[in-house]
Amino acid sequence: MKTFSILLISFFCFSFCPPTEKAVDNLSNGYYISVIDHTDRTYHSFIVESRDSANIIFNKYFESELDLGEVDYPITIFNGKRDFYIARVNVFIKSNGERDFKHLSYPSVFDKVSKTNKRNSLSPAIF
């Protein structure tokens, strides 16, 4: 009888209590953007899911000085007035309804450089 009651209670708890990791299922691709404006000393951060929204934010702060291309790796731009950072992230909605993100894991840039740089493996020329 004890095992039956424990089994019944555990079934009740599992059926009516949602799992805590349910927010991870709602993953979507997006961008994390942070802008530090040194002219008026403000900090803004954005989490957007579309590339058009990222372009609108980029054009707002740089007034068409530059064009935002493909974001393969995180990009940092500093032009003396503004410090702009953009990175691709996985966007998900937390259980309380707020948006949050997880950074993507990028391969190291320096591994590719050191493997392709054959000059390091050559011996110096002696005259």
Image: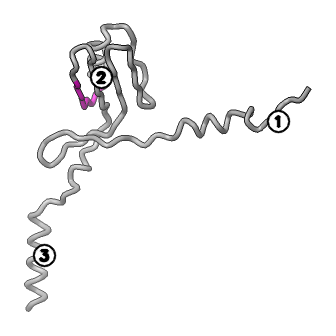
Among the 4 quarters of the image, the one containing residue 91? top left
Q: Which residue is mark 1?
A: 123
- The amino acid at mark 1 is Ser
Quote the CA–CA distance across marks 2 and 3: 47 Å
* Dot 3: element: helix
In the rendered image, residue 17, in percent from the top left (x then y), is placed at 11, 63
Q: Does the magenta-highlighted stretch encompass residue 107?
A: no
1 or 2: tag closer to the N-terminus: 2
Q: Which residues are magenta?
A: 43-50
Q: CA distance from mark 1 to mark 2?
A: 48 Å
Query: Which element carries disc 1, helix, strand or loop?
Result: loop
Q: Nearer the viewer, mark 3 or mark 1?
A: 1
- Which label sits on residue 97? none
Identify which residue, 56 or 37, lies in the foreground.
Answer: 37
Give me the residue at 11% from left, 46% from top. 96
Label 2: few (<14), some (14–19) or many (≥20) C-alpha neighbours in 10 Å: many
**Disc 3 marks which residue?**
10
Left or right side of 48 for 17: left
Secondary structure, magenta segment, majority class? strand
- Relative height, residue 61 to residue 84 (above, below): above
